[in-house]
Amino acid sequence: MFFNSSFRNHLFIILFSLSFFSKSISQIDPSQLLKERFLGAYYQGLYPNVNQSLVSLDDIQTNSNQIERMNFYKISTALRLNEISAEKMIDNFEFDYPESYFLKTVYSDVANYYFQNEKYSYAYKWFLKTDQSQISRQLLPKYYFNKGYTFFLKKKYEEAKKLFESVKNNPEYESDSHYYLGYISYQLEDYEEASNSFTRVTKKNQQEDLSYFQVEMNFKLGRFEKAIELGLKELTKTDRNLFSQISKIVGESYFNLGKYKESIKYLESYNGESDNWTNMDYYQLGYAYYSSKDYSNAIENFNKIIGQKNELSQNAYYYLAECYLNKEQKIASLNAYKSAFEIDFNTEISKNSLLNYARLSYEIGNPYDKVPNILMYYLSKYPGSEEENEITKLLIDSYTKSGNYDSAFNILNSGSYKDEDLLQKVTFLKGVELFNSGSYEKAYDFFDKSINYPNDKRIIARSYFWKAQSAYELNKFSESIESFLKFQELNSDAFFEESLLFHYHLAYSYFKSEEYDQAISNFNEIVDRKNLFSDNIVNDSYLRIGDSNFLLTNYFPAIDFYDKSILVNPNNFEYASFQKAMSYGYLDKDKEKIKTLGQLISQNPNSYLADDSLYELGNYFSSIGDYDKAIINYDILIEDHKNSKLYARTKLNKGLALYNLGKVKLSDSILRNLVIELKNNPISMQALKTLKEIAVDLDNVIEFTNWIRSFDFQTFSDNELEKTTFEAAESYFLKGEMKKAERAIKSYFERHPNGRFFLAANFYLAEIYFFEKQWDLALKSYLDIIDLSLNDYTEQALVRSTQILLNENKLKESTKLLKKLEQIASYPKNKKYAQFNLIRTHFHSSEFEEAIAMADKVLAFDNIETKVKWDARYFLAKSFLSKKDTLNAKNVFMTLEKSPIDSIAAEAYYFKAQLKHNEDAFIESNEVISIISEKFNDQPFWAAKSLLLMAKNFYEQDDIFQATYILNSLLNNFVQFPSIISEAKAYLIIIEKNQDI
C-alpha cells in the first residue's frame, strides 16, 4: 500500500469497556476475570480465544444490555473469522434488536478490519453492504478512500473515481487520491486528465512510480519531444522490463517525428510483448532503416511481415520493392511491386505499385507476362490518370522494341494519342521488318509513308536508303539509284549507320542497270577507303570492278582488279582467276589464259570452277586443232568430275575430238555409250547427229538405223511433233497455269513416254506437285529424276526432295540425298543449303562429330546468309554441349548472345546464367537472367526456364521469399510447359521441407 495509517479502537468498543469496568476493583467477582480475558483477546485480535470466553460468559449474563453487547461481540468475532454463519447472525441480531446502535457500524467496522489486514476482496464485500449515512463525518474521508481503493482493485474505475474525487482535497489522502485518479484516467485513456492528476501527486515514492506513465502518456498525447526527454532520463535508471517498454516509446516518438535514423537504436532495444515482436514492430524498424537508406536491414525486417494480405503487408511490399530497387535488384523489386498492387487495401499504394511495376517491366522486361499487356492493364485500370501519356508512350515503345509494329500503329492511328515523331519512327521500323522478311513491295510502301512525315530528317534520309534497297530487290534499279542519290543528298551533314555502305549498294544498283562506269566509280569509293571495310566487302568490290571492266571489254583493267581481289583474299581466288583467264582469252593472250587456268586447277583440283577450267582448256585446244591435248583435259574432267553439269557435254566434245582425229570407231563407241547413258537428254540428240555422220562415213547406215530402233529412240521425223507438244505444256507451266500445264504434260507422256523432253517434262510435273503441296507425288517425280544419270535437273530435284523429307523429319533419307547434293551442286547456294541441313540431320541423329565438322565447313564460307550463319553456330554449340565439351560450347554460346534470332540469343544467355549458377555466382546468374527478361520477353519457354533458375539462385542466397514467390508465379503463368512446371513443384516441396526442419 502507498499509506501507513492503522485502525484505531472503535468508539463504541471504548464506551462499552468503560461502562463494563465502572465498578471498583474491590467489587470484582469471578465472572469479572472471564470478561477481562475476553476483552484482552478481542483487542489483541485473538478471535478464537474470544469465542471461548464468550461461551463461558453466556451463562452469567443476565442484564439485557449486557446480553445485547455479548451477542454483538459474537457477530463481530464471527465476521472477523469470516464464518459462514456471520451474516445469519446479523439477520437474527437485527430482528432481536432492531434499534440497536451496534447495527449502524458493524459493516464498516468489518470492512475496515479486512482493509487494514490487506484482505481487499473481503473488504470490498463488506463495503458493498455499508450505509454511508451511518458513518460519522470524521470517519467519512477514511471510509471514502478505503472503499475507493477496494473498488479500484476490482477495476470498478468509475465507482472508485467518484470516491477518490471525494477526498482528493483532503490533506491526508490528497497525494494517494490523485495517484489513483491519474491511474484510472490513464486506464480510461483520458490522458489529459491523467496527466493533471499525476502532477498533484506529492509523495516521492509515488512520483518515482509515475515516471513510466508520464513517458507513455506524453507519447499517447502526441507530445513526442516530451516523451523522448522523459524517456531518455528514465532509460538511465529503470529496470530491464521497463527499459524495453520505454525504449519502444522513445523509438516510436523519434519515428513519429520523422527522425528515423535516431529511432533505430531504441526500436531495436524493444523486447516485444512476451519476447515476441508484432508485424508493426518489424514494419517500423524496417521503415526506419529504409528512410535511413540502410536498405539491407530494411529488407531483412520487411521480409518478416510479408505473406499476409492486409494493409500493413501491402505497405511492407511497397517499401520492400523500393529497397530492392535502390540496391539494383530489379527483378526482386518487380516481384515486390507486383505483390503490393495485388493486395489492394490502400488504393493509392496499389496504383503507385502498379505504375512502378509497369515502368520497371518496360525497363528490364517481365518474366511473367508480356510488357505491353502490363502497360495496357495499367491504362485500363486507371483511365485518365496523370501518367496516361507516359504509359502510352512506353506502350508504343514496347511494341516497337518487340517488333509488334501493327499494335503500335493501332494506338498511334486511334486518335487517343498523337505523336507524329513516333508514328514516323514506327513506320520506318515496320518497313525494315518487312524488308528483312523479304516482303520488299510492302517494305517499299512503308518507306514511302515514312518519307511523307516531315518530322525527323534523319528518318527520312534512312527511309530513302531502305526504299532504294527495296527497289533493288524488286529489280527496279532506276528507282533504286534515284532513292540512293536522295539519301546521299540528305546525308550531306550527318552520318548514319547506312552511310558506310552507301556507295557499295549504289554501285550494285548501277551494275544491275548495266551502267558500269558509274558502278566502277562507286565501287572505287569502297576500295579507296578499304581500311573501313571488311575484307569480304573489299574483295567483292574489286571483283565487281573487274566484272564491270570485263563487261565494258576493258580487259586489262579487269585483269588488274581481279589480281587485287586475289591479293585481298588469296584463299578465294577461283572466280577471279577464272575471269582473269577469260579476259586473257579475249585479249588473244592464249598462253596467259592457259597458264592461269592451269594454275587454278593445280592449286585447287577440287575447286568449284575446276570443271569449267578443264572444259575451257579442252575447248581451246579443240579450237586450235590440238585434239590430243583437248582430249587430255576432257578425260580429267570426265574422270574427276562425274557430278559436273559439264560432264555430258565434255563426253560429247571428246567424241567429236576423236572423230576429228580420225579415230572414228572410238568416237562412235563413246558417243553411242553417251546416247544410251543420257537417253532422252537433249545432248543425246546432238550425239545422234554425229553418230549419223559416222555411220555414213563407215557405210554403216542400216546398222545405225537398226541400233536406233533397238533402243526405242524416236526417229528424226518425230522430233518436230514431239517438240510442239512439249512446248505447249512448257508454255502453260511458265505462265503459271498449273492445272493446264499438268494436263498437257500428262498428255505428252502418253504420246511420248520416252521422249527427248522426258526430263524437263518430269521436272515440271514435280514442280507442279510441289507447289500444290502434293508432297508424295512431288517426291516420287523428283526421285525419278535423281535416279537417272546426272542431268540439268538433278541438282534442283535434290533440293526439292530434301525439303520435303526434312519437313517430314525423315532424317536418314534426307541425309543420303543431302550428301549427294553437296557432291554434285554447281551452285554455291545449293552446296551451302546441303551442308547446313547436314548439320541439322547429323545433330538430330546424335552424330555430333559429323555435325561439328559440317558446321565448321559452313562457317568457313565468306558470304554466308545471316540466318544460316547463326543456325550453324547454334548447332555447333549444341553439339559441343551434347559431347559435354563445355569449354567449346561456352565459347560458341558467347558468340550466340549477339544473334539476331531471339530464340537462339535467349538460349545462349540462359546457358551463361546456368554456368554462373554452377559456379555459385548466384547474383551474377540473376543479372544475366534479368537480361533475358528485358530482351526476350517474347520467348516464354526461356522465360520459364530462367525463372526456375532464378528461384534456385535466390534460395541459395537464403532469400526464401523471392524463391517461393518466383516459383508460385511460374506455376501460375507457364502451365504450357509441363516439364518445367513439374520441376518447379518438386523444388518448391524441397524448400518447404527444409523450412520445417
Image: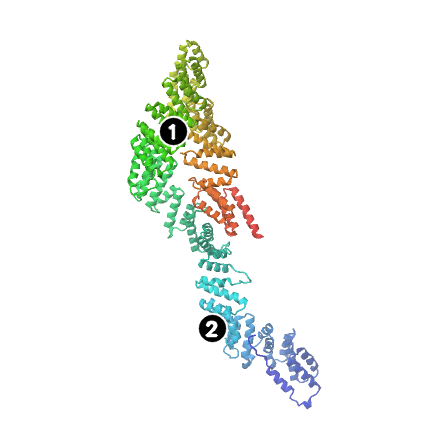
Q: Along the line of sight, which residue is nearer the eye, 772 or 442?
A: 442
Colour convention:
rainbow
Above/below status of 977 relative to 346? above
- Quadrant for the N terminus in the image: bottom right
Above/below status of 581 relative to 209? above
In the rendered structure, the answer to whether residue 274 lies left or right of residue 891 reads right
* Secondary structure category for the residue under label 1: helix
Answer whether residue 190 is visible to the viewer in this image.
no
Image x and y of residue 338, in percent: 46, 51
Q: Earlier in the sequence, mark 1 or mark 2?
A: 2
Above/below status of 626 relative to 260? above
In the rendered structure, the answer to whether residue 205 lies left or right of residue 860 reads right
Q: Local crowd at mark 2 within 10 Å, few (<14), some, or many (≥20)?
A: some
**What's under tag 1, amino acid-wise?**
Tyr
The residue at which mark 2 appears reads as: 196
**In the figure, residue 764 lies in which quadrant?**
top left
Alpha-carbon span between mark 1 and mark 2: 108 Å
* Secondary structure category for the residue under label 2: helix
> Measuring 54% from the left and 47% from the top, which residue is drawn there?
987
> Measuring 37% from the left and 21% from the top, which residue is drawn there?
620
